[in-house]
Amino acid sequence: MNRSETKKRLLSHETDILIVGAGINGAGTFRDLALNGIRVLLIDKSDYCAGASAASSHMAHGGIRYLENGEFRLVKEAVMERNRMIENAPHLVRPLPTVVPIFKLFSGLLNAPLKFLNLLNKPAERGAIVIKVGLILYDSFTRKQKTVPPHSFVGAEESLRKFPGLAPDIKYTATYYDGQILSPERYVVDLVMDGKKEGSHALALNYTSLHKFSSGVVTLKDEISGELSEIKPKIIINASGPWINQTIGEMGLERHYVGGTKGSHIIVENATLRSAIGKHEFFFENNDGRIVLVFPFFDKVIIGTSDLPIEDPSTARITDSEIAYFLTLVSRIFPRIEVSREQIIFSFTGVRPLESMKAKTAAQITRDHSIKVDTIFGTKIFSLVGGKWTSYRAFSEQVTDVCLRELGINRRNHTRELAIGGGKNYPQVGLAQIEFIKQIANPLGRKIVDARGLFDRYGTLAAEISRFIAQGTPTPLASLPGFTDREIEYLAKFEDVAHIEDILLRRTNLAWLGFYKLNTIKEVGAILSSALSWDDTKLADEVRRTVEILKANHNVEAG
């Protein structure tokens, strides 16, 4: 069911639950409710995963640093959920060896317990002993799952042998495992599509906003056509992330549930740095005590992140001072590698929807999740506050259970071991993957241009896409090696694409990897123009819109 068909279905759809916000928590809850037969509608004023959830550090992690804050339950839950993400979405989440460079032995022995007791807020460098204790505890949370190996600890000689470019004053390196999310946006899209496939009781509409709420009736607005429609849900789930306060304000209540912090990242094309880190993330304290990361991203490198208080999430943009900071932090661990502005191919910024609370530093604000309950016009409003990206499934499960109790319905399906999107029946070993790729390379007896590329991008969903490609006459794209017009057409027809940037930023990683030049935008736009029945004026507007969004939101020139 595409976007146009969903709009028609909505006219006769009785909605029990409306979810406002199609980020990771909204999408996860939508899928869980859909699996349990609830008549649910998911909306977002923009595209799926176009807000805070798109600004993830691309890590599925437990949050080892939150152990110092005493958030043991949060970390244990997140580590278990990290493992579930690796197991349930292997096409998008992979085990990631994470290296912690250590320059001192005893440092932080006193600071760690004082921070735990909330008696210290000044950043302090953690030494080998503190880090070792933390990693032992971190591993203990999921020792039985054995999804990832336990941590290891080596001295300076072995560290410099493995990573010859490291700072010569290194004392130790610790290596532990978390997860790498290859595309957070694709992950959310898979969740939404899985929910929709459960049946006509589960509807999702991007570019649709909550226009008005009065006497229990919600007026929805199509942000593309301007059309209005009405529904009367029994429950409204406010999953609008950093916009939670504004969303509930539009429904008539003044609340201050969230007070977020801004996090920015840059993606650089630096072959020397990429070679130096290999398959490893480097997670370390910079000279000012801030926790930062250098992260492999295909053949590029992600560098981040900031953690700065912000009032209006709509104004979140990367600043020159953040960029300057990111460019210099690499020298802390790789002093001989220079990273320059010219090597930046992409940047992204988002706001963490953290619970509004008093804390001495942004890092001490809890990352735990909670449900805030209000009643307006007799309609229950559940606002989803806080939470880590990695813990979304557990949070969605909690929200779904609350909704089922409210509706008087028993849970019939669980998501703990349920594969996601292209992770279904995913071939885990190399030979099985080769065999799968061979099978999808010749659907209907016609050879597909790049079956391996389809598998890498979509997992086992590649089988369905390859059949669609073979049913037409695929033409390779001049500006995008390995892609055909039929692949783009599939995404347009079956994944609710409405704009060019939906393809470049969220259905694929193209823009994130630097494929956003004007010829690419125009070529993709021409395919969408045919698939979505745009006229020449609409196409020109879409090309212009994409260029402007890339500049404003990601600080890159598409010309």
Image (cartoon, grey):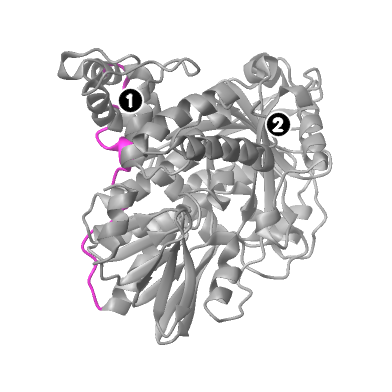
Q: Which residue is mark 2?
A: 101
Residue at 23% x, 21% y: name it: 470
Pointer 2 local density, CA inside 10 Å: few below 14, some 14–19, many at least 20: many
Residue 157, horizontal then vertical, whole percent: 71, 18
Q: Is residue 520 visible?
A: yes
Q: Which residues are magenta?
A: 408-431
- Residue type, numbered disc 2: Pro
Residue 294, horizontal then vertical, whole percent: 66, 31
Q: Is residue 337 above or below residue 47?
A: above
Taking depth in this image into account, of 239 and 361 the one nearest to the observer is 239
- Residue type, numbered disc 1: Arg
Q: Is residue 417 visible?
A: no
Q: Which residue is mark 1?
A: 486
Residue at 56% x, 30% y: name it: 511
From the image, which quarter does the C terminus lie in?
top right
Residue 44, horizontal then vertical, whole percent: 46, 57
Q: Is residue 405 above or below residue 523?
A: below
